[in-house]
Amino acid sequence: MVGWRNPARYLAPLALAAAATATYLIVHHALEDKHASPAPAIVQTTSTHARSGGHANAKAKFYVVQPNDTLSKIATRTGVSLSTLEALNPSINPDALHPTQRLRLRP
């Protein structure tokens, strides 16, 4: 009869359940954020909507680098050639792009 009054008998399973629930919520939230990939951030700095035919890529002057972007992906996504991107951004290292880094798309 000594063992059944010990509160650890009840608190240990509750602590285990709380730890399992917290672990599940943290992992679920991390996976949810990972799968929700944001649209490419193209910064529009001019208002040439009528002249450009309404294409966002035609009027954007800068591109904000997203995670896992490469210079060739950015060139394809924005419609700007790779050589133009390199010429307009001479100080960038194509092998070391960082998220939130801004690249010039137009002169």
Image: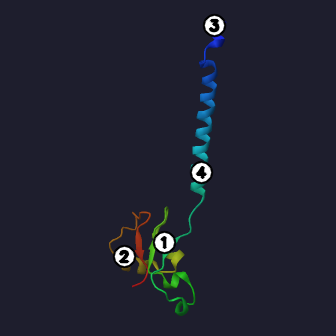
Mark before the other along the chain sequence, 1 or 2 = 1
Query: Where is mark 4, residue-wise?
Result: 31
> Crowding at label 1, few (<14), some or many (≥20) Cα neighbours within 10 Å?
some
**Element carrying mark 4:** helix
57 or 17, which lies in front? Answer: 17
Seen at 57% across and 62% down, the residue is: 37
Mark closer to the observer (1, 2): 2
**Residue 80: image location, x then y, percent:** 48, 80
Query: Where is mark 3, residue-wise?
Result: 2
> Crowding at label 4, few (<14), some or many (≥20) Cα neighbours within 10 Å?
few
Residue 34, compared with residue 91, is above or below; it is above
Separation of residues labelled 4 and 3 (CA atoms): 46 Å
Query: Where is mark 2, residue-wise?
Result: 89
Q: Are marks 4 and 3 in contact (CB under 8 Å)?
A: no
**Residue 35: image location, x then y, percent:** 60, 57
Q: Are marks 1 and 2 in contact (CB under 8 Å)?
A: no
Seen at 54% across and 81% down, the residue is: 56
The part of the image, by quadrant, that contains residue 98 is: bottom left
Seen at 61% across and 35% down, the residue is: 20
Mark before the other along the chain sequence, 4 or 3 = 3
81 or 63, which lies in front? Answer: 63
Give amino acid for label 2. Answer: Asn
Separation of residues labelled 4 and 2 (CA atoms): 34 Å
Q: Are marks 4 and 2 in contact (CB under 8 Å)?
A: no
